[in-house]
Image (cartoon, grey):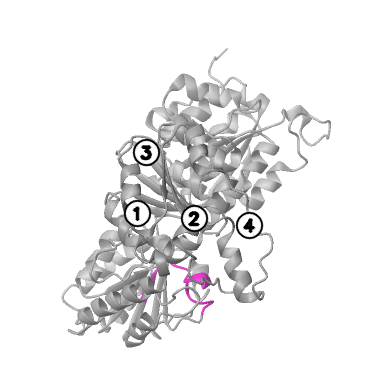
Amino acid sequence: MSSYLVGDLVAEFLACCGVQAAFGIISVHNVPVLDAVARQQRLRFVMARGEMGAAHMADGFARASGGLGALITSTGPGAANAASGLLEAGFAGSPVLHITGQSPTRTLGRGQGAVHDVPDQLGMLRAVSKAAWRVHSPQEALGVLTRAAVEALSPRQGPVSVEIPFDVQRSAVERPAAFDRFVLPLPPRRVPQGAELDALVERVARAKRPMLWLGNGAREAGAAAARLLGLGFAAVNSQAAHGIVPGDHPMNLGALNGSRHSSPDPVVEALFETCDLLLVAGSRLRLSETREGQCRLPKSRVQIDLDPAAEGRTYASELFVCGDSAATLDALAQRLEGRLQVDPAFAADVAAAKRQAEDAFRATLGPYAEFPGQLRAVMPRDALWVRDVTLHNGSWGNKAFPMYGPHDGMFPIGLGIGQGLPLGIGAAVAAHAAGRKVVMMAGDGGFAMNMTELWTAVQERLDIVVLVMNDGGYGVIKHIQDSVYGGRRHYGDLLSPDFGRLAALAGMPHWKVGAAQELGDKVGQALAVRGPAMVEVDMAAIGEFPAYVVPMK
């Protein structure tokens, strides 16, 4: 009888898919899988303090690495705890393969009170994942896992769950010979050809002042986008798509895309009005980034997206092209060589608009105006910039902080708080091999939701600086209450821990910023430390954050 179990197959499958690290918590219903992970020693297992944190870590790893994230949880409550992380991975289009256990097949659906038994775990997982399947027998394990990984990595990417009953995990099976030459059967990305590509080229070639809007779906299109900027295009990007074109490229306005807090940026919108083409690649033009669809974008728009349902989802387009953003933009750039005749004044107008918009934006930040510049100056160019939902991220963190690589930044796309620290831990695991640093910024309110994951960062010896913006509660909510509810601030003040003592308890150094000009120096000292470090910003000492209003409908 074979000593190779389905648990061994799962562990080897993850390694064959190129997974370098998995995240989760060991439990009675996943021991066969994690025992195999430990014996095979082909991937790192990161022991989180909760399944919610583990799910966000797997998401952060996938975003930072550009590959498949792996999450291993227990059955029932363990799988349910991971739901928020799976939801966020779906918002972000992040490929996460979630492996969870299940009660033994003889008890499934019988309501006999088996350990961790829930009436419809698969239905719960389908509600928060792109797809969810069950392995019913040892013989189908490889096929189901392969289908799940392919689904997670196929456009639009997202989390996929697979539940494997405990008795199936422990069942003997022959080691698949396919593992000796394993390749995931990923479908080819669609690239427009013939008349379809001709129509795109002809429409774009007429532009004199073309603007490119890059979204998360164009994350691998950096080289093609740079070629278009070299031909005279200007560019903006969605907040999730920083770094596709480096933030210091003179023709890249980054996320200064016509919305300053909840009101328009007059400089950028004025520039938009002079553009005779907006080429949108891989972006939904999210309502949260276009003033609920009221931003005055260039009237002539062309859209490229792999999802045919993206056509007209927020803004209408003159031409919609269904195709992979990177390959389509590359083909377009090749065909435009020597044909595009851009207005000679356009580059100067873009540079002036960028300079004026940045200056105007900093002026809205009050005592925190120099925070973006101070922080950027001390962070290595290749450092990863991870943020939770905070006043600081919703303003300068998302919009006025340059990033230089397509996987250098991340934040909760679904705008849930508390996710920043585990996202940062996952990113730090991905960045570890290259010796890259991670800076993760959170508010004190959001940080409280997953603060126990500090011990995960310490145990894994990760190079992450935890930057806590301490304003004594839920600052975003207080600003909404000021703006919309007559200043009636209820339920927003929190009793937070002494962060210096918390850091000491976790065994990590701590610095406290009590004046605005100290930020760069304190973060620089923290970055010089090997392993995790904490920097706390005392916002009460520095001053009130200027009014920041989230659009309310």
**Mark 3 crowdedness (10 Å alpha carbons): few <14, some 14-19, many ≥20:** many
Q: Which mark is residue 493?
A: 4
Q: Element under label 2?
A: loop
Q: Nearer the viewer, mark 3 or mark 2?
A: 3
Q: Which mark is residue 518?
A: 1
> In the figure, residue 264 lies in which quadrant?
bottom left
Residue drawn at x 44%, y 26% as measured from the top left: 177
Mark sitting earlier along the chain (2/1): 2
Residue drawn at x 65%, y 28% as measured from the top left: 29
Q: Which residue is mark 3?
A: 463
Callouts 4 and 3 close, C-beta under 8 Å: no
Real-space Cα separation, disc 3 to disc 2, in angstroms: 26 Å
Q: Element under label 3?
A: loop
Real-space Cα separation, disc 4 to disc 3, in angstroms: 31 Å
Q: Is residue 69 left or right of residue 81?
A: left
Quarter in which the N terminus is drawn: top right
Q: Amino acid at mark 4?
A: Asp
Mark sitting earlier along the chain (1/4): 4
Q: Amino acid at mark 1?
A: Glu
Mark sitting earlier along the chain (4/3): 3
Real-space Cα separation, disc 2 to disc 4, in angstroms: 34 Å
Q: Which residues are magenta?
A: 279-293
Mark sitting earlier along the chain (3/2): 2
Residue drawn at x 31%, y 47% as measured from the top left: 524
Q: Which mark is residue 93?
A: 2
Residue farthest toward the top in the current orientation of the protein: 1
Q: Nearer the viewer, mark 2 or mark 4?
A: 4
